[in-house]
Amino acid sequence: MKKIIYISLLALVFAVSSCKKDSFNTFEIEKANPVTDSLLQAKYLTPFQQAGVMEVTLTPKGNEVKQVFYFFKGSGTKINMVGKSRKFATPAEVDVKYATTPVTATIDFTESSLFSSIITDLGSELTRGADYSYAFTKVHENGFELEGIQYGDKLTVRILDPASKEAKYIADGGIQKDYEAQDRFYYATPFISFDVEGKPVQMVVDPNFSGTWLFYSNAKSEVDWQNNTTSYLPTVSHGLSYITSSLGDTLRFNKEVPIKNVILKGLVWNAERTKYKALIQENNQEKLVELKEQTVPFYSFTEERTFELGETLEREFYFSKATIEEKMIYDIVNRVKLPTKFKIDFDKLSSDANYSAGWSPELKGQLLAIRNKAKELNPDKNITSFEFDFAKSRDFFVAYELDIHIGLLAKYKIMMDKNGVKDSIQYTNNILAFKVDLITFTDHKFYGFDDPVSVPMKVPENTSAAYKIWPQLYDFLKNFDDAVTHIHYLPALQANQPMRIQMKSMKTNRQFVVDGIVPK
C-alpha cells in the first residue's frame, strides 16, 4: 500500500510539473486536485477542519531538530498558526487549501505560512524552508501523521480539547510568556550548572535560538587539554535545541546527554518561573537537581575559551564542515557577553588594597616596574593602565603562539595620559613565542620586539639574533611562558564595575587579577 501511495504521489508531481518555479518551491497541488473523494474527506480532512486546537510537531528530513506549532481554527478556510519559539510566538493567520488524490488527502499551508520561514540547516551551506504541502499518511486516535510532498518533512498532529488547560494556555499567549521568562533568566544569570564527579556541567540556555550550550570537562592536566597540536576537545560539549512543553514548565532537549553516571534530559521551571532545575536520570530513576546560577562562567577561561577559539568554531569551518550542533554552539557562544580585553589600573594597583587583593607580591612588583619603566621613558605623562587583548583566531599566529593555554594573546598596551590626551606604547602580536617543528614537535623559543617601539614579530636565524625586549616586561611574562594558565572569572568589586578575572600560572603558582572588559 505504501508503495502505491508513493507511486501515485510521484505521478502527481509529474502531472503538475508546469507549476514548479524552481527546486526550492513546492508544487501547487491544490490547483490540479480539488476534494473529490468523500471517504478521504471524512477520514482526514473533516476531523482536521473541525479541530479547534492542534499541536503540530515538525521533524525536517535529515535534521533531528524538531519544532512545535499550534493551529487554532480561524474563519472560513483560515487557521491561526503560532510556534514554540521566539521567532514564531506571534500568531499568524494562514489560508489553508485542501485536496484529495486517488489514494490520500493533502493540505497546502501556502507560501504565506510559517513553514516557508522555517530554515532547515542541512550543513555545507545548504539551507531551505520546510515543506508547506503535505499528504496524510496515517490516522490515529487523537491526530494524524503527514509527509511533505517535496522534501519529505514529517508532521505529527495531535488534536487537543479546546477546554483543556494546555489549549487555553496557548490561546492566552502562553508561548510569548514562556519566551519572556526564559529571556529574563538568560540576561540575569546566563550560566547555570550542577556537579558531576566534582566538576560543573555548565549550561547556557539561549531563547533566541531555543538552544542550549552544554559544556563539561574533567581535564586535570595539560596532557588532558592538548594532544600534540590538535585543538582541545572537552569531555562533553553539545549544542542542543529544546522544545518547551505545552504549559511552558519544562524544556526538553532534542536528545538525552550521558555525562559519566547520569543522563541529562532537560530543565524544569519552578512555579514562579525564576529558577530551573536539571532533569536527570540516575540509576534508572528520573529526578530534579538544584542548579547553581552565575553571571560569569563556572569554567576557567583557559579550558572554555581554548575550545571556543579552536578551529571548530572558525567562520570558515562553520560554513563548510560544521554540524548542526557545532553551529548551535557557535551561535550561542557569540551571543554570550564575555570579556575579550583585560585591564590593570596602575593607580589602583599601587594605592587600593582591595584592588590588589589576591595578587602574588612578585607579580605586583613586576607590573609596577613596567609602569616605572614607561614613566622613565615618558616623564611628562601619567602612566594609567596596562591592557591586553585576546585574539579571536589562530590565523593571526599560524605556528607562532604564546602558550596555547594562556589564550592566544594578540596585543599589549601601556596606556598614558597627558592633560586628557591619551597615548600608548603597543606591542602587537605575541611578545613571547615559540615555533613548533611540525615533524618532531620540538619547540624553538624566540623573543620579540625592539625597545620600545612596536614592530612585527620576526623569526631570527638563531636565538642570538633575537630582538630585545624590556627586561621588566619579560620578567612579568616569563611567569606564563610555556605554562598552563588557569583563568577564572570573579564578581565585580562593586555594582556597575567590570567583572574581575584571576590569572594563575601553574608553573610558578603566581597569580594576578584584572578587570574584564566586555565588548559592546
Image (cartoon, rainbow, N blue to C red):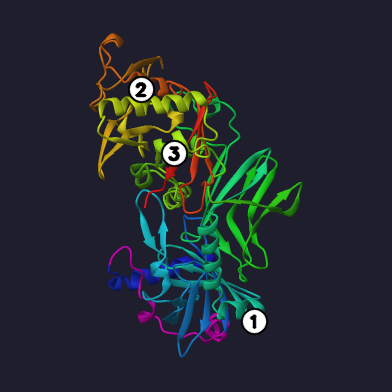
User: In the image, is residue 50 part of the stretch drawn in magenta?
Assistant: yes
At label 3, which amino acid type do we have? Lys
Tell us which disc is closer to us: 2 or 1. Answer: 2
First in sequence: mark 3 vs mark 2 = 3
Which residue carries the number 2 mark? 433
Q: Position of residue 284 (x, y in %)?
A: 76, 49
Whether 178 is drawn above or below 298: the answer is below
At label 2, which amino acid type do we have? Ala
Q: Quadrant of residue 101?
A: bottom left
* Local secondary structure at mark 3: helix
Of residues 116 and 198, the one drawn nearer to the viewer in this rendering: 198
Q: Residue furthest bottom?
A: 76
| Marker disc for residue 161 | 1
Which residue carries the number 3 mark? 348
Q: Position of residue 326 (x, y in %)?
A: 46, 46
Whether 453 is drawn above or below 169: the answer is above
